[in-house]
Amino acid sequence: MSQANTHGHADLAASIKSYVTGFVLSVVLTGIPFWAVMTHSLERSTTLAVVLVLAIVQIIVHLKYFLHLDFSKEGKINTFSFMFTALVIVMVVGLSVWIIYAANDLMM
């Protein structure tokens, strides 16, 4: 078996393991808030906190296991590109909302 063929199988196995790990974590991170909301076993504020925290954790899981964004040598450029794009989107949306509210105040 050639070295390139062995390396390809190792990469494929690592990729599949990453996707399966991400999938399992996503299911768990979706199931817990669903349970908290449907059973009403926690206080309303606690349920809201659980949903918000697990939503943020799930975003991180998706970025790491599905988009493979990290600070390794190979992934650093993709990570910085994603962060810049996210910053631009947050600025555009945030400033648009600010302008809309300011225009609304001026019309009243």
Image: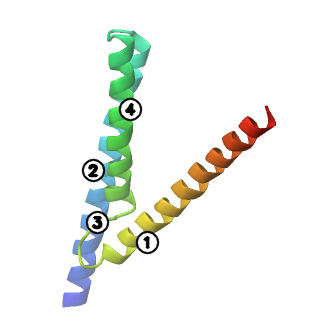
Which residue sits furthest right? Answer: 107
Give the CA separation, mark 1 to mark 4. Answer: 26 Å
To which residue does mark 4 refer?
52
Residue 19 seen in the current view: yes
| Mark nearer the viewer, 3 or 4 | 4
| Mark nearer the viewer, 2 or 1 | 1
Q: Based on the displayed image, in which of its 4 quarters is residue 24 positioned? A: top left
To which residue does mark 1 refer?
81
For marks 3 and 1 on the same chain, the one whose residue lies earlier in the sequence: 3
Apparent side of residue 61 relative to residue 98 in the rendered image (left or right) = left
Residue toward you, 50 or 97: 97
User: Crowding near pointer 3: few (<14 within 10 Å), some, many (20+)?
Assistant: some
| Mark nearer the viewer, 2 or 3 | 3
Residue 75 seen in the current view: no
Apparent side of residue 72 relative to residue 22 in the rendered image (left or right) = left
Can you say whether 50 is above or below 44 in the image? below
To which residue does mark 2 refer?
21
User: In the rendering, which numbered label is found on residue 70?
Assistant: 3
Residue toward you, 14 or 55: 55
